[in-house]
Amino acid sequence: MVTRPRLFAGARLRRLREESGLRQADLAARLGISASYLSQLEHDDRPLTTALVDALTRAFPLDWAHESADLTQRRLAALAEASADPLFADPLDAEQLARIAEQQPALADRFVALHAAYRRAGQRLQMVDEALSLDSAGGARLPWEEVRDWFHLANNYVDVIDRAAEALAARLAGGSSTPETSAIENHLRGALSVSLLYAANRGLRDFDAEMGHLVVDPGQPPESRRFQLAHQLAALALKDDISALVEEAALRSPAARQLLFVGLCNYAAGALLMPYRRFRDAARAARHDIDRLRQEFGTSFEQTCHRLSTLQRTDARGVPFFFCRVDMAGNITKRHSATRLQFARFGGACPLWIVHEAVAIPDRILVQLAETPDGVRYVSMAKGLVKPSGSFARSPRRYAVALGCEAEHAREFIFADGLDIAAPQAATRIGVSCRICPRPDCDQRAFPPSDRAIVVDPDRRGVVPYSLA
């Protein structure tokens, strides 16, 4: 029989409480213990029990995993997350998980790896199912679909580019949170020998590589102009790293490779303007208040939301978010999820999702608690945006962005304040899209799921004119 080492973590526990702005009584209540017991734990008079480690992991899924440097504790946290998948009807309790992590570490590691592979395989299967259901020729993907899937399977985090952009930002920003526009302009002119001109009627950004001449449209909002400068800086300064990734991607067409190069330059621009560590720390401190973050980093609402969805660095993970952009017709033009929620790759999203209402109400933030068919709950924020064109002759672009996380991270997400996360009837029951949604009783269903037959009764009519077999 294996004897478990006693775990004393008073300093880590105290630091976690202080950084979270909690009093001893507050943290004790959250963990379900007395304040005097917590005081003993913080002074290393008593060790942490398995049940307390489990409570800390659930209460602080990001912070406690980061604080727990012990390999067994990290393994236990990963095992607990995998075993909590709705796939399993009865999750294992904390004592069982601890025994497995300590007594069968190789088995635990393989279980976690298999669960990750299962999720990836499910995502790939969903891609194939949706493509076949739309009768696409042989399931062939268009170039932009190849690039979209490349980012999705990379979990929307590209380590080599992110770290290179962060290092470049540190040189340009000095002690500031983010490089100033003037610093980016000076680096383009001085270090990269680029001549820069602000002029209209040349598109948003026009770069002559042979002459080293860059023209940026001044009619864009300031944060958009700054992003275009950052894009060009990344395309030149990080060209070798970006080109190597494009070569390794094994995409099928020149157009797909060119699109991936552009996408990686955009990724690098976001990482340059919102450097990983500084941005992650600021996001946690502000509880992911997007308006506060975009003011601090000089970025747009959409850019800030998108960057929040990329914070998946192994040694410093952020809250796992999903992010998407939806146009006036309901098309998803950007999408990524670090959560269990997966977006429809073809067609529209679920009509019950708050993002569709947000498109029609620009500059107003809407909040929703939603539940998917697997029983997982999500808190999401959506906002309609209008991007000016800079000219009366061109219509402004109208769309909405949405950002959300699983309900277990609600304390980290300021937009969840005021929602009753646990109330049984509080959540809107959404799906991914009608084409693959299994719910038999949805009044908003546009068409039946592709894998289910329908039953039509001429003598009965409900809200939907058929039932599912």
Image: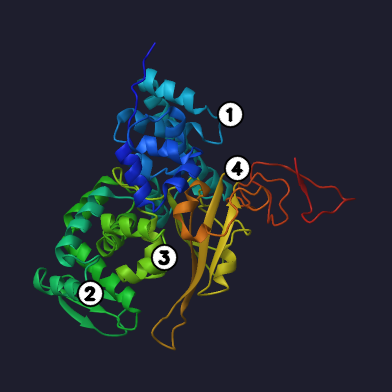
CA distance for labels 4 and 3: 28 Å
Counting from the top left corner in percent of width and height, residue 61 is at 42, 43
For marks 4 and 2 on the same chain, the one whose residue lies earlier in the sequence: 2
For marks 1 and 3 on the same chain, the one whose residue lies earlier in the sequence: 1
CA distance for labels 3 and 2: 21 Å
- Which residue is the site of mark 4? 375
CA distance for labels 1 and 3: 37 Å
Nearer the observer: mark 1 or 2; the answer is: 1
Give the amino acid type for the residue marked by disc 4 in the picture: Gly
- Which residue is the site of mark 2? 181
Counting from the top left corner in percent of width and height, residue 206 is at 26, 75
Q: Residue at x 65, y 47 (%)?
A: 449
Give the amino acid type for the residue marked by disc 3 in the picture: Ile
Q: Which numbered dot is residue 290?
A: 3
Q: Residue furthest bottom?
A: 392
CA distance for labels 4 and 1: 13 Å
| Mark 2 crowd level (few <14, some 14–19, many ≥20, 10 Å Cα) | some
For marks 4 and 1 on the same chain, the one whose residue lies earlier in the sequence: 1
Q: Secondary structure at mark 1?
A: loop
